[in-house]
Amino acid sequence: MAEPIVTVSGLDKCFKSGAEEVYALRGIELSIERGEYLAIMGPSGSGKSTLFNMIGALDRPTRGEITVGGVSLPKLSSAELSYFRGRHIGYVFQSYNLIPSLTALENVMLPIIFLGATDEEARRRAAEVLEYVELGHRTDHTPGELSGGQQQRVAIARALANKPTILLADEPTANLDLKTGEMIIGIFKKLSTDLGVTVISATHDHKMLAVSDRIVWIKAGQVDKIRKVSEMNISTGSIGGH
């Protein structure tokens, strides 16, 4: 087995609602291998997004341990967590979250400059990753001048700008047509197989599930089951085992 890049042990997340405690996560145990393409599934309110945020260093657990690359995230200060996110985690969201007034190149430059790079270095790296997602010819276009698929590719380039260890993708194909969605899925698979980036996707897209290595189902704040995709039969509209 490959070296785990993420280890989650006894992870709880509890929110207080008046005098009542509501558990979004309860005793999560999960290990994710370096370079793995993992899909996380679960209905609304299952705790899927909370777990996603924990892995991405966006939220802290109430109890339990989560390590990413051997670093214990609960032990980091807020400033250290912010730096860790910028250096090691890339995010791709359903809604792209690009800055409308900036060009594709400038949007991708932002996280590079945030970590202290010079403008020249940021420009070079941003151009490089935009070429990787086949948008080298649209660097000077603003989001409003790009299609939805092109905007999502700019968002992927931005997520890759600082060469992250982990790429978190939250329903990244939900707003895209079939052909464009397949292109995005192809980019994610290439990142996993060619560059060794660990891709963790929250998705219900069967095409994305089909190219994953494993699928984790979250139910009522707990891991319900984990299956290897190679042992399953995934087709549009259904997920079955061999």
Image (cartoon, helix red, strand yellow):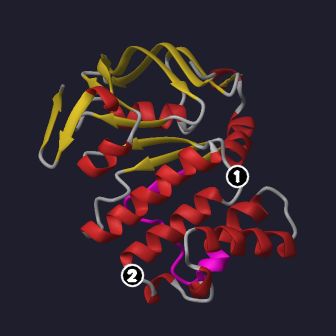
In what quadrant of the picture does the C terminus appear? top left
Amino acid type assigned to the residue bearing label 2 in the image: Ser
Q: Which of 23 and 43 is in front in this view?
A: 43
Query: In the picture provided, is 99 more to the left or to the right than 208?
Result: right
Residue 221, percent from left and from top: 31, 21
54 is higher (above) or lower (below) than 163: above
33 is higher (above) or lower (below) than 142: above
Residue displayed at 24% across by 21% down: 220
**Residue that sits furthest to the left in the current view:** 237
Element at label 1: loop
Residue 137: which quarter of the image? bottom right
Residue displayed at 79% across by 73% down: 124
The residue that mark 2 highlights is: 147
Amino acid type assigned to the residue bearing label 1 in the image: Lys
Q: What stretch is highlighted in magenta?
A: 90-107
* Res 205 visible: no
Residue 63, percent from left and from top: 51, 13
Residue 203: which quarter of the image? top left
Which label was assigned to residue 209? none
The residue that mark 1 highlights is: 163
Residue displayed at 40% across by 65% down: 183
- Crowdedness near tag 1: few (<14), some (14–19) or many (≥20) residues, C-alpha within 10 Å: many
Residue 62, percent from left and from top: 49, 18
In what quadrant of the picture does the N terminus appear? top right
119 is higher (above) or lower (below) than 219: below
Query: In the picture provided, is 46 more to the left or to the right than 189?
Result: left
Query: In the picture provided, is 196 more to the left or to the right than 235?
Result: right
Q: Distance between the residues labelled 2 and 1?
A: 25 Å
